[in-house]
C-alpha cells in the first residue's frame, strides 16, 4: 500500500470535510444508470468499431431502462428483496475512539471490455455503451449472483468475486485500459466506524449517471478529487494536458453511497436503496439517515489510466468526462469480507488487500500470504 497518499485516502474520514460536502450537494435520487450487457467475447470488437458504435449505444441511455424479468429479479419489477431484511444496530452510548483510518483495499485488475451492464440491462447483451470490467472475469449481461459466485477473480483476494465496471476510456479511436491492479477502497463513511457491516451477497448499485451534467458531477457527494493529472486537480472535465512523462497518469477518485435501506438488494433505479451519509445535527458526526439506517463499507474507486501529454481527444464511452459513473455487484465470499471489515474498518486500521496495516504490525493481518483466510 502506498503510504504517500495516506492523508488523501479518506474524504469521509473527516467530519468537517463531509459536512461541507453534504451541505454542498443535493439529496435527490438520480435516474437509472446507462450500462448493459454482453459476453466477454465482445472485446474482440475493434476499437474503431466500438468508437463508431458509441453514439448509438449512448443514445439508449436517454431514458431509464424499464425493469425486466431476469435472473435475480424473476418478476421483473426492479426490486430484489434482501432475505432476511436487515435492521441497523442501536446507536452507541458514545462514539468510538477517533481513528483517522478505517479501511482496506481491494486491488483488482481489468479483465475485459464489453457493451454490457447486468445491473441496468440484465440479460440484454450489447445494450449499453462499452464498459471496462474489473474483478470477476465472467461478468457479462447475463450475470447473476449465482454466476458471479461461481466465477474467478482478478483481485488479489480471490474471494472477491464481485463485479466492478465503468465506462471505457478512449483516446480518439484507441481504447485506453487501466494497467495493473487498481485501488478500490472499502472504508467507513460514518463516524461510528464500529457500526459498519459487510455487504450482503447480491447487493448491487450504480454510482453517478451518464446523463449527469458537469455541475451535478462536481457537486456529487461522491466527488473526491475529480479528474487529475500531474498538478491539475478537481477537474470535472479531462485536464487540457498532462505532463509528457512516463510516470504521469490520468487519475480519478469517486466514492459510493454507503448507507443501505436494509430491505432491497436492488431497486428499479439502482440507487434508491442506497444513500450517502448525512451530518448529525449539531455535530460534525456522519451518520446514516433513518431511511437508510444500515452502515455498509463505502467504496471509493481510485482509478489510473496510462495517459499523458495531449488529452484533447479523450472521451468516455458514455460521453464527456463528467459522465463518469460506475457499477458494483457484490459477490464476495461472506466469511472473507466479514474478516476484512471487522479487522480493518471496525478495527480502525489502514489495511492493504491482505488486511495488514504496516503502521500497526502488532495487529496482524486478516488474510494469509495468499490473500485467503488462514
Image (spheres, helix red, strand yellow):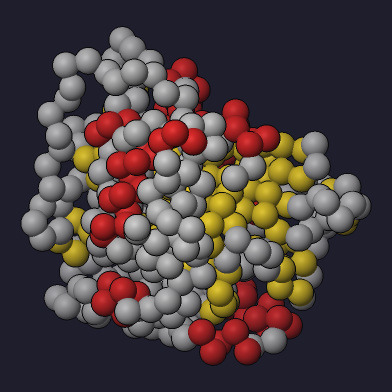
Count of numbered circles on the image:
0
Task: Give how far across and how far down residue 143 sits, in percent.
Answer: 35, 78
Q: Residue at x 24, y 34 (%)?
A: 195
Q: Residue at x 37, y 65 (%)?
A: 159
Residue 136, quarter of the rendered image: bottom left
Residue closest to the far front? 362
On the question of residue 45 being in view, the answer is yes
Q: Quadrant of the N terminus?
A: top right
Residue 206, quarter of the rendered image: bottom left
Residue 72, quarter of the rendered image: bottom left
Residue 353, placed above or below residue 27:
below
Residue closest to the far top? 282
Task: Give how far across and how far down residue 249 sits, in percent.
Answer: 76, 52
Lateral position of residue 319 relative to residue 238, left or right: left
Task: Give how far across and how far down residue 273 sits, in percent.
Answer: 25, 50
Q: Residue at x 28, y 72 (%)?
A: 145
On the question of residue 36 being in view, the answer is no
Residue 300, placed above or below residue 53:
above
Observer-nearest of 91 and 76 = 91
Residue closest to the far left? 84
Observer-nearest of 100 and 122 = 100
Q: Residue at x 65, y 64 (%)?
A: 180
Task: Give how far across and how far down residue 56 sits, in percent.
Answer: 57, 77
Q: Quadrant of the C terminus?
A: bottom left
Amino acid at each position: 500500500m502506498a503510504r504517500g497518499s495516506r492523508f488523501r485516502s479518506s474524504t469521509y474520514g473527516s467530519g468537517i470535510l463531509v459536512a461541507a460536502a453534504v451541505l454542498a450537494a443535493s439529496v435527490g435520487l438520480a435516474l437509472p444508470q446507462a450500462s448493459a450487457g454482453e459476453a466477454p467475447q465482445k472485446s474482440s470488437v475493434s476499437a474503431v468499431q466500438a468508437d463508431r458504435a458509441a453514439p448509438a449505444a449512448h443514445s439508449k441511455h436517454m431514458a431509464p431502462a424499464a425493469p425486466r424479468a431476469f435472473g435475480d429479479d424473476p418478476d421483473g419489477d426492479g426490486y430484489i428483496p434482501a432475505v432476511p431484511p436487515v435492521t441497523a444496530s442501536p446507536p452507541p452510548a458514545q462514539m468510538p475512539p477517533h481513528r483517522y483510518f478505517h479501511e482496506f483495499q481491494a486491488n483488482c485488475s481489468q479483465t475485459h471490455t464489453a457493451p454490457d451492464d447486468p445491473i441496468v440491462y440484465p440479460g440484454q447483451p450489447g445494450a449499453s455503451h462499452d464498459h471496462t470490467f474489473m474483478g470477476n472475469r465472467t461478468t457479462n449481461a447475463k450475470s447473476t449472483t449465482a454466476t458471479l459466485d461461481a466465477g474467478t477473480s482478478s483481485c488479489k483476494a480471490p474471494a472477491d468475486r464481485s463485479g466492478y465496471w465503468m465506462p471505457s476510456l478512449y483516446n480518439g479511436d484507441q481504447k485506453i485500459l487501466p494497467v495493473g491492479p487498481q485501488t478500490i477502497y472499502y472504508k467507513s463513511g460514518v463516524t461510528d466506524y464500529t457500526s459498519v457491516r459487510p455487504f450482503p451477497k447480491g447487493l448491487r448499485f450504480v454510482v453517478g449517471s451518464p446523463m449527469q451534467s458537469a455541475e451535478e458531477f462536481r457537486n456529487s457527494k461522491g466527488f473526491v478529487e475529480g479528474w487529475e493529472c500531474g498538478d491539475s486537480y478537481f477537474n470535472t472535465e479531462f485536464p487540457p494536458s498532462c505532463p509528457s512523462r512516463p510516470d504521469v497518469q490520468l487519475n480519478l477518485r469517486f466514492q459510493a453511497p454507503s448507507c443501505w435501506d436494509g430491505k432491497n438488494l436492488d431497486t428499479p433505479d439502482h440507487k434508491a436503496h442506497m444513500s450517502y451519509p448525512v451530518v448529525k445535527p449539531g455535530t460534525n458526526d456522519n451518520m446514516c439517515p433513518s431511511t437508510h439506517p444500515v452502515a455498509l463499507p463505502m467504496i471509493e474507486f481510485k482509478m489510473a489510466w496510462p495517459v499523458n501529454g495531449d488529452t484533447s481527444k479523450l472521451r468516455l464511452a458514455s460521453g464527456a468526462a463528467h459522465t463518469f459513473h460506475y457499477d458494483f455487484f457484490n459477490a464476495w465470499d461472506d466469511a472473507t469480507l466479514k474478516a476484512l471489515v471487522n479487522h480493518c474498518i471496525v478495527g480502525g486500521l489502514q489495511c492493504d488487500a491482505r488486511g495488514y496495516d504496516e503502521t500497526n504490525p502488532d495487529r496482524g493481518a486478516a488474510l494469509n500470504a495468499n490473500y485467503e483466510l488462514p
